[in-house]
Amino acid sequence: MTTTQRTLAAAGSLAALLALSACGSSADAAAPGSAGSATAEYQAVADSAACQQLREEHPDLVGTTKTNALNPYTPGYETIDPTNPDQYVGFDIDLGNAIGACLGFTVDYVPVGFAELIPTVASGRADWIVSNLYATQERAAGGVDFVSYSKVYDGILVAKGNPKGLTGIDASMCGATVALNKGYVEVPLVEDLAPGCEAAGEAAPVVSLFDSSADCVQAILAGRADAYVNDSNTVVRFIAEHPDELDQAETVLLDYEIGIGVPQGQVPFRDAVVGALTEIQGSGLQDELAKKWELSENAVAEPTVLSVG
């Protein structure tokens, strides 16, 4: 897929404000997960006193388009619309559009590999990241500030029946081949098991790196990997797609939060996102979107900023 940008319209009540920005076509507006089909979801937030005040405080955002760098291979969060390959759908798509509706801008997208999310924003090729990205000090050091919005529950995807008897990111993974996305926080967590495994006379886990979640799952289905670790909701989605072949071994609460990445130094934009998220959470919209996309373990986290700048 090229870096063709796809624009989605924000809330209908902001149409006059957004007249100068790119808007979706009538076909776009009918696509599931697009701003056009979710106007009612965003309307109350867009019309709230808090969002009106935010637009007054940040007039430079009104009528603009913000490009979201995303890795569109995570079911429930961001994927290519199966009914329209020119659209993306998922919780993060809706959340980004809700923030845009609150602040008066529209959203378009540039799809990249997971490991390229932060470099794409840090280099100025995109304006922000709303792509189920765990906020860490190491990632922030790559040139972004994070605004958190959800706690992290990881699931361990395995073959049906859990033949390796995996119980977590623990000694049970000794000798196992674990498929992970390049750049995932789970990579060092699994690699750090090696000394303990070797001290116990067992082989260290083998980390097999891939560019997308779908590739990791295919590795398990093909017998080339024993496990895959990712957001628990994502794991459940893949099991639903392959109920006779896949299982979940365990759910693990990690000491991370999911965050929106904003380029370091863009404090007004970052603070505007904090304000929009605060209103979205307070209105209950974030919970509603999580239910819409069947993210049962999407635990709201009060917006906080992680910055190393």
Image (cartoon, rainbow, N blue to C red):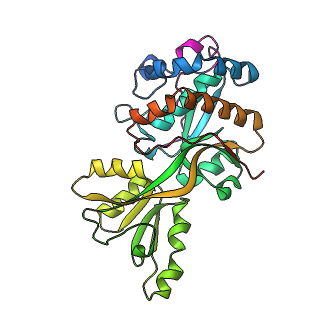
Q: Position of residue 229 (x, y in %)?
A: 43, 60
* Magenta segment includes 12: yes
Q: Nearer the viewer, residue 216 or 195?
A: 195
* Magenta segment includes 120: no
Q: Position of residue 150 (x, y in %)?
A: 54, 44
Q: Nearer the viewer, residue 114 or 241?
A: 241
Q: Within the image, what quadrant is residue 27 found in? A: top left
253 is higher (above) or lower (below) than 196? above
Q: Position of residue 177 (x, y in %)?
A: 40, 72
Residue segment shown in magenta? 1-21
Q: Within the image, what quadrant is residue 84 found in? A: top left
Q: Residue at image x 24%, y 58%?
A: 245
Q: Residue at image x 57%, y 54%?
A: 256
Q: Residue at image x 58%, y 37%?
A: 68
> Does residue 87 appear anywhere in the picture?
no
Q: Main secondary structure of the magenta part?
A: loop
Instruction: Give the farthest residue toward the left.
Output: 244
Q: Position of residue 297 (x, y in %)?
A: 43, 45
